[in-house]
Amino acid sequence: MAQKKRFTWQNILFIIVILLLIIPQTRTPIQVAINKVKVAIFSPSAFAKKDQTQLQSFDYKVSSLEGIPAEVGVGKGKVTFISYWATWCPPCIAELPSIAELYADYGDKITFLLITNEDPEVVKKFMTKRKLDLPAVLPAMETPELLFERSIPTSYIIDQEGNIVVKETGASDWNSDSIRTIIDNLLAED
């Protein structure tokens, strides 16, 4: 006699998730929610001193969302946080609130560059809608080779001498105690 298959709540939930992923309007919110879970449990860590990559100090040429050009020194005596991101990227969207919290506390102590290649008006609307106060900029030069990655988000913490202390690809909690300790230790070296 053949056994009768029963639908359990797990099967029903699985089918609902699959259906929601098929519907285009629900994909991004679901992916953001999944990445928020990752952000809640994962925080980047620093490279050991011997494993840090040294950048040549340089001026990162960028422009504000209003089109104002700027040159921001990297590895020139100030700690720098750089994040490559996009408004359409679910892991980026998931981690931006933690970057905003970090920026609120350290924005006057370290340089923040949130670099995107998107249309400035799209970025402005995104920031307004999500109530994010972050220094989003557009690149006005090629990405330096040591900072180039094909994946976004990719974020870095670079010390005063240009050493890449933290590099993380994917959604992370940038407002964690461990990141704050890393930054505080770097600032204490001044």
Image: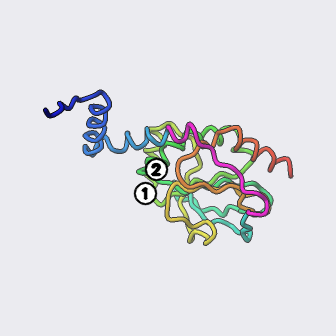
Q: Which mark is residue 123?
A: 2
Image: 27 above or below 70: above
- Residue at x 56% of width, y 55% of height: 169
Depth check: give the residue in front, 143 or 36.
36
Q: Secondary structure at mark 2?
A: helix
| Amino acid type, label 1 | Asp
| Amino acid type, label 2 | Val
Depth check: give the residue in front, 188 or 23.
23
The magenta segment? 37-51
Q: Position of residue 35 (x, y in %)?
A: 47, 43
Any magenta on residue 43? yes
Q: Is residue 94 left or right of residue 184?
A: left
Any magenta on residue 112? no
- Residue at x 25% of width, y 43% of height: 23
Q: Secondary structure at mark 1?
A: loop
Q: Which mark is residue 119?
A: 1
Depth check: give the residue in front, 2 or 112.
2
| Residue lying furthest front | 1
Tell me the quarter of the picture where residue 164 sits: bottom right
- Residue at x 15% of width, y 34% of height: 2
Q: How much space separates mark 2 and mark 1, taking CA atoms?
A: 6 Å
Asked whether residue 122 appears in the rendered view, the answer is no
Crowding at mark 2 (Cα within 10 Å: few <14, some 14-19, many 20+): some
Q: Are marks 2 and 1 in contact (CB under 8 Å)?
A: yes
Tell me the quarter of the picture where residue 168 sits: bottom right
Quadrant position of the N terminus in the picture? top left
Asked whether residue 135 appears in the rendered view, the answer is yes
Q: Is residue 146 left or right of residue 66?
A: right
